[in-house]
């Protein structure tokens, strides 16, 4: 679990600053996959659940199946 003492470690701060460089790209990717999921007919709950439980690549591969009403598929 999260420990507030980690915030005081210099290694944690350095890692957090390094990760900030990827944040704009991750935000754009999340927005794009979210819009694609909503446009393919998923509800907000389903899109959020898929976004939290899968990695981005299967999310995009799954969109074609969902848009074509192919039922439940497993892509990983």
Image: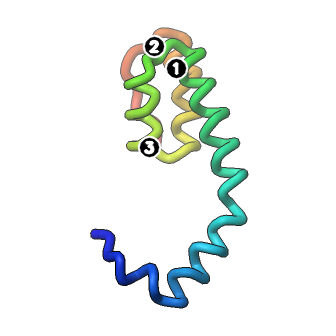
Name the residue rendered at 45%, 79% in the picture: 7
Q: Against 30, is 71 above or below?
A: above
Q: Which mark is residue 40?
A: none
Q: Circle 2 — which element?
A: loop
Residue that protrudes farthest toward the left in the picture: 1
Name the residue rendered at 59%, 15% in the picture: 39
Where's the N terminus, which quadrant? bottom left
Label 3 vs label 2, nearer the camera: 3
Q: Position of residue 73 (x, y in %)?
A: 40, 26
User: Along the horizontal axis of the image, is 34 left or right of 69?
Assistant: right
Name the residue rendered at 58%, 43% in the picture: 57
Residue named by callout 3: 54
User: Along the horizontal axis of the image, is 3 left or right of 35?
Assistant: left
Q: Circle 3 — which element?
A: loop
Q: Position of residue 53 (x, y in %)?
A: 39, 43
Q: Which colouring convention does the figure follow?
A: rainbow
Q: Circle 1 — which element?
A: helix
Q: Position of residue 72 (x, y in %)?
A: 37, 21
Precedes in sequence: disc 1 or disc 2: 1
Label 3 Cα crowd, 10 Å radius (few <14 / some 14-19 / many 20+): few
Q: Against 70, is 47 above or below?
A: below
User: Along the horizontal axis of the image, is 62 left or right of 6?
Assistant: right
Q: Quadrant of residue 19?
A: bottom right
Residue named by callout 1: 65
Residue named by callout 2: 70
Q: Nearer the viewer, residue 38 or 20?
A: 20
Name the residue rendered at 66%, 42% in the picture: 29
Precedes in sequence: disc 1 or disc 3: 3
Label 1 vs label 3, nearer the camera: 3
Marks 1 and 2 close (CB-CB < 8 Å): yes
């Amino acid at each position: 679990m999260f420990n507030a003492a980690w915030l005081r470690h210099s290694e944690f701060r350095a890692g957090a600053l390094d990760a900030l460089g990827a944040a704009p790209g991750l935000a754009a990717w999340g927005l794009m996959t979210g819009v694609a999921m909503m446009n393919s007919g998923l509800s907000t709950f389903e899109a959020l659940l898929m976004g939290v439980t899968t990695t981005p690549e299967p999310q995009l591969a799954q969109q074609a199946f969902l848009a074509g009403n192919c039922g439940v598929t497993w892509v990983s």
